[in-house]
Amino acid sequence: MQEHEEREVEIKLESVWAIQNLSLVSSAYPTDFTAVVKTLTGDVLNLDHGRLDPNSLTNMLFLKEAAVQTLGNLAFDSKDLLLHILPSTKLITDLMALKRTTLTKACLWTLNNIAAQVTKSEFLLELQIGKTLEGTAKCYRGERAQNLTDGQKELLKELYWLT
């Protein structure tokens, strides 16, 4: 990734953090935050992280993690925004396949916030994300369960709450 692109990711990360702080009042500004949701789901979560060097990949994943957390705030604060976030739930669950503990925890936290606004069983069935969640749970069960980090234990708490 060129220096210009790295700087662009840093600026986007700072922007998403600012929006995350403002997301607590999103229900007061539904039109503005609808545009924010479209940007986060359409641009940020869809950024290609395929062939990046390790440093650039880390920055990109921090950006996606911040975007996912912001979407979780927005989904919880506003049912109107939730309707715009729901179609991106598959995108959020797909990020868990990267097996980054903090990113996966952010994804599960956001899914919990979405599920809190709708019937959980309908949510899981309608979006057909059960297999992704089951795969994530298997990663942290069995022999590995004895060697879990505190972060992974927190992730499991989020996962079991959701299911």
Image (cartoon, rainbow, N blue to C red):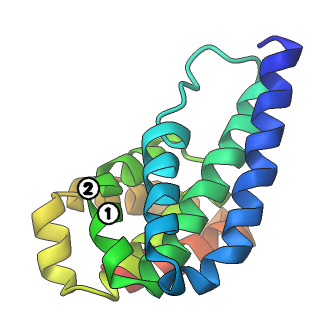
- Image height of 149 relative to 89, above or below: below
- Image height of 45 relative to 27, above or below: above
The N terminus, quarter of image: top right
Seen from the viewer's position, the closer of residues 134 and 23 is 23
Corner quadrant of residue 105 = bottom right
- Image height of 147 relative to 55, above or below: below
Circles 2 and 1: CB distance less than 8 Å? yes
Q: Amino acid at mark 1?
A: His
Residue at the location (54% across, 79% down)? 26
Corner quadrant of residue 9 = top right
Where is mark 1, residue-wise? Answer: 84
Where is mark 2, residue-wise? Answer: 87
Q: Amino acid at mark 2?
A: Pro
- As helix, strand or loop, the secondary structure at mark 2 comes to helix
- Where residue 55 sits in the image (x, y, percent)? 83, 27
Residue at the location (86% across, 28% down)? 7
Residue 97 in the figure: left or right of residue 129:
right
Seen from the viewer's position, the closer of residues 100 and 143 is 100
Q: Is residue 108 visible?
A: no
- Image height of 152 relative to 158, above or below: above
- As helix, strand or loop, the secondary structure at mark 1 comes to helix
How busy is the neighbourhood of tag 2: few (under 14 within 10 Å), some, or many (20 plus)?
few
Q: Is residue 1 visible?
A: yes
- Where residue 43 sits in the image (x, y, percent)? 50, 38
- Where residue 152 sits in the image (x, y, percent)? 63, 66
Residue at the location (50% across, 78% down)? 158
